[in-house]
Image (cartoon, helix red, strand yellow):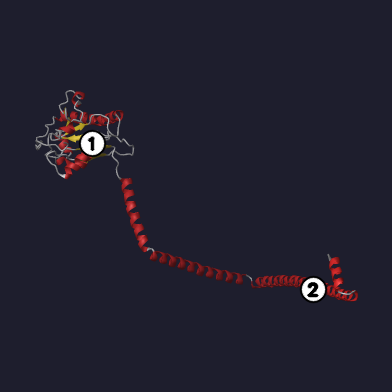
């Protein structure tokens, strides 16, 4: 390619001019190359000097450090323990100041946090208190081993606690929590009344009948026949010769019972009835029979114990007649 260019240039210039121009060009090119080589050499020399100066500076610093350490060691040896003690005291004071500042800083941050979040913290405290109360109440609340429903409507409903203690004498610790507790749920039903309370009580008792876990019911002569139909009317055949057992259940017509319940004018028509074992919405017939046997065991224990005591003491029974109520209409209808 260069030969072609030279031939082209020769064609434009005569031979003398061409040779002269070529010499000038080659000389300039050579000078530029030499100049670039000198520049490169200068750059390399400058880098070399900079590296050497850096090494020398580092050597000087290392030497100064060594000298400083020597002087420091000599000063410590000459001063002895006084400087060490002073240094420790200064360090302790400095540490105390730092600790104090940190404590002040933490307190300040805490105050600032509580100030800006006092409403949320207040609400949280209220929620925690309520939750704690509910949890404490739930954990400490006595869970019943057995529940007895009382649907008769008389002054016996004012003796809930004595009634519960009365039943607890004959019930075992079913749930194994270390104590026996019987809960008497008072659901008075009076078919002569038609107010909202009676409607609610009626619904409540019917709802309880979905489960067969609790089979014992306290009734009286005013209890609607609709409810007595679900009670076991064959109880008398299971206790032949016992005058306190009839088709309504176990009669509490005993002075000893009135004394236990502290109910001087206790009506003489109160019975403890037991439901028939039938399948319900929640339980199968097999489950109902199992629950019946459990409840019957406690009722049987009560019947045998109270009957024996009544016969031994020749219990005179109760003289207070029940109040007759209007049975012309029924809540269950």
Q: Is residue 132 left or right of residue 273?
A: right
Q: Which label was assigned to residue 39?
A: 2
Q: Is residue 234 left or right of residue 100?
A: left
| Residue 105 visible in the picture | yes
In whole angstroms, how far apart are the C-alphas of marks 1 and 2? 117 Å
Which image quadrant is residue 169 in?
top left
Give the image location of residue 290, x and y in percent.
Answer: 30, 29
Residue 165 higher or lower than 81, as above or below? above
| Residue 262 visible in the picture | no
Residue 70 higher or lower than 242, as above or below? below
Q: Considering depth in this image, is 33 or 247 the residue closer to the camera?
A: 33
Residue 235 higher or lower than 133, as above or below? above
Quarter that holds the N terminus: bottom right
- Category of crowding for the residue at label 1, using alpha-carbon neighbours closer than 10 angstroms: few (below 14), some (14–19), many (at least 20): many
Q: Considering depth in this image, is 129 or 170 the residue closer to the camera?
A: 129
Give the image location of residue 147, x and y in percent.
Answer: 25, 37
Q: Residue at x 35, y 62 (%)?
A: 119
Q: Which residue is mark 1?
A: 167
Quarter that holds the C terminus: top left
Q: Considering depth in this image, is 17 or 91 the residue closer to the camera?
A: 17
Q: Which tag is nearer the camera, tag 1 or tag 2?
A: 2
Q: Considering depth in this image, is 148 or 232 the residue closer to the camera?
A: 232
């Amino acid at each position: 390619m260069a030969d072609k260019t030279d031939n082209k240039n020769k064609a434009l210039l005569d031979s003398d001019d061409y040779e002269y121009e070529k010499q000038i060009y080659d000389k300039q090119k050579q000078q530029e190359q030499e100049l670039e080589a000198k520049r490169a050499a200068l750059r390399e020399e400058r880098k070399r000097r900079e590296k050497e100066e850096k090494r020398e500076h580092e050597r000087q610093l290392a030497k100064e450090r060594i000298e400083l350490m020597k002087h420091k060691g000599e000063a410590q040896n000459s001063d002895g323990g006084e400087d060490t003690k002073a240094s420790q005291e200064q360090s302790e004071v400095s540490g105390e100041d730092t600790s104090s500042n940190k404590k002040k800083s933490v307190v300040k941050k805490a105050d600032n946090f509580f100030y800006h979040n006092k409403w949320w913290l207040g609400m949280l405290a209220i929620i925690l208190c309520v939750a704690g109360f509910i949890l404490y109440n739930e954990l400490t609340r006595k869970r019943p081993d057995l529940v007895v429903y009382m649907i008769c409507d008389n002054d016996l409903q004012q003796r809930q606690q004595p009634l519960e203690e009365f039943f607890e004498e004959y019930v075992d610790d079913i749930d194994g929590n270390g104590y026996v507790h019987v809960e008497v749920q008072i659901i008075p039903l009076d078919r002569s009344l038609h107010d909202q309370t009676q409607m609610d009580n009626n619904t409540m008792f019917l709802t309880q009948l979905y489960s067969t876990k609790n089979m014992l019911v306290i009734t009286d002569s005013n209890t609607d026949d609709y409810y007595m139909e679900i009670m076991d009317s064959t109880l008398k055949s299971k206790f032949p010769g016992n005058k306190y057992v009839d088709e309504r259940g176990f009669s509490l017509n005993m002075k000893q019972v009135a004394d236990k319940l502290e109910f001087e004018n206790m009506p003489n028509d109160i019975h403890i009835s037991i439901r028939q074992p039938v399948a319900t919405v929640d339980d199968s017939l097999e489950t109902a029979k199992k629950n019946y046997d459990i409840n019957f065991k406690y009722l049987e224990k009560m019947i045998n114990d109270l009957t024996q005591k009544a016969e031994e003491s020749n219990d005179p029974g109760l003289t207070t007649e029940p109040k007759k109520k209007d049975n012309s209409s029924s809540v269950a209808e």
